[in-house]
Image: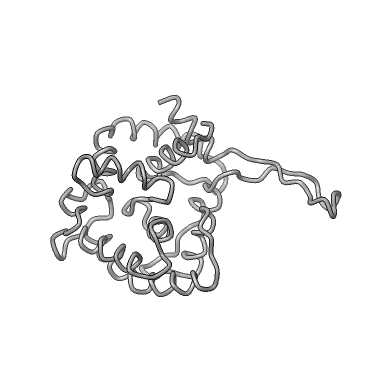
Amino acid sequence: MTQALETVSAYAFATETLDPGPRFPYAFTPHPVPRYGYRTYDCVPSSPGPAFTDLDLLVSAGLNADLNVRTLVRLRSFADRAAEHLEAAHRIQPDFLLLPRDELGDSPPQGTAGWHLHEAWRQGTATPGLKVARVHKVLHHKRPRLVPLLDNWTIAPIDTAATSRGCTAWQQIHDEIHAHAEQFRDLAAAFDQLACGPGDVSLSHLRLYDILIWMSVRHLPG
């Protein structure tokens, strides 16, 4: 638990120094800026209501997603198509961890929260140019307790574990967090004690899980 809290705290609060470039070495005073994406992603509020605003799309850049015009128009199209399904899933069950496990498979029962969640995800993955990272980063930020967060770094170990167990990546995440439910509750509570500054936010168990794996596979200090 101590190591897990140190890892999450490093992700949330670690900084690096921003220095002026060599052309104008005295243009401003060097100062600390966030090193990772807590401030630029998690602490940016999502828009109210079911629709995605442009900020809901742009905030994915605050979590290392490269954006250009082609990507933005595809994100806009995907978000407009996914919004109704994501809202329907949220109305039925807003908590990923309370979804029945079978609703997180490849063929969830039609009309269930898991089916609507799968449809929201499918609208993204069916869009050319949008892959696992961009789709999950946009959906997770809108509903951080409902949508898991996966990217190009974390999908590999999760998929490997899921394949070995004959389940989906979402089911693997569901199973692992439930298997360590008490530890995740303790970690979330401990982080809340630290996240008490202006603009700080709590982190869902899904996000805590993502941070722990991402920091591990990137071999970053925590």
Q: Residue sitting at 20 percent across and 57 percent down?
A: 106
| Front residue (pair 221, 179) | 221
Q: Position of residue 181 (x, y in %)?
A: 28, 34
Placement of 86 over or under 12, stated as above or below: below
Q: Position of residue 201 (x, y in %)?
A: 48, 46
Q: Residue furthest top?
A: 2
Q: Report whether 141 appears left or right of 19.
A: left
Q: Name the one closer to the observer, 137 or 189.
A: 137
Residue ID at (50%, 73%): 70
The N terminus appears in which quarter of the rendering? top left
Q: Nearer the viewer, residue 77 or 1?
A: 77
Above or below for 137 versus 211: below
Colouring convention used in this rendered image of the protein: one colour
Percent x, y of residue 103: 18, 54
Q: Residue at x 25, y 46 (%)?
A: 97
In the displayed structure image, the side of residue 82 where residue 151 appears, left or right: right
The quadrant holding residue 76 is bottom left
Residue at the far left in the pictured view: 109
As drawn, 82 above or below 162: below
Query: Is 161 rendered above or below residue 133?
Result: above
Using residue 91 as the reference point, say whether residue 189 is left or right of it.
right
Q: Work out whether residue 155 or residue 96 is closer to the camera in this orientation and state it.
A: 155
Q: Position of residue 21 (x, y in %)?
A: 79, 51
Q: How many marks?
A: 0
The residue drawn where x is 44% and y is 41% is 214
Q: Quadrant of residue 141?
A: bottom left
